[in-house]
Amino acid sequence: MTGTGRTPAPRGATGRLELDPDRVGRDLVCLVLTVVELLRQLMERQAVRRCDQRDVTDEQVERIGTTLMALDARMDELCAQHGLTRDELNLDLGPLGTLLER
């Protein structure tokens, strides 16, 4: 994955990629968690927007806040479980900057 500081997989004499199953698994987990984190951040922005527009009741605001805090805590748990940090989930998109909000 780009932006993670990892080097590309080495190529063997036959031109085939020599893939390390552990690395492939970790990169897949990183990609999935990146997508989940992106969705979490988008949901959070939408919730803030709705709250700012007073489009929700006080009870709904409370539920939204509790849910978003639980999702944030769960992301921390999942990252720790797989030996990742939130910074590792943030893909570098070159001239566009990074994918995730910090």
Image (cartoon, helix red, strand yellow):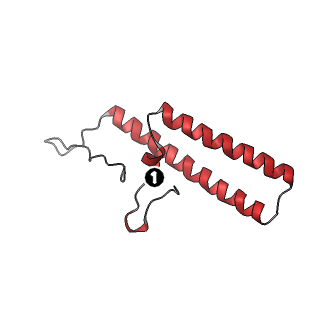
Q: Which residue is mark 1?
A: 90
Residue at the bottom extreme, as displayed = 95
- Residue drawn at (40%, 58%) of the image: 92
Q: How many marks?
A: 1
Above/below status of 35 relative to 49: above
Left or right: residue 70 versus residue 57 is left
Identity of the residue furthest to the left in this view: 13
Quadrant housing residue 49: bottom right
Residue at 80% from the left image edge and 52% from the top image edge: 61
Q: Nearer the viewer, residue 91 or 87?
A: 87
Q: Is residue 37 left or right of residue 3?
A: right
Residue 43 drawn at (x, y percent): 66, 54
Quadrant in which residue 24 is drawn = top left
Disc 1: CA contacts within 10 A as few (<14), some (14-19) or many (>=20): many
Q: Name the one closer to the observer, 58 or 42.
A: 58
Where residue 41 appears, as percent x and y from the top left, is 60, 54
Residue at 75% x, 49% y is 64
Residue drawn where x is 35% and y is 53% of the image:
2
Mark 1 residue element: loop
Q: Tell me the amino acid under the disc marked 1.
A: Asn
Residue 11 image offset from top left, x and y in percent: 19, 44
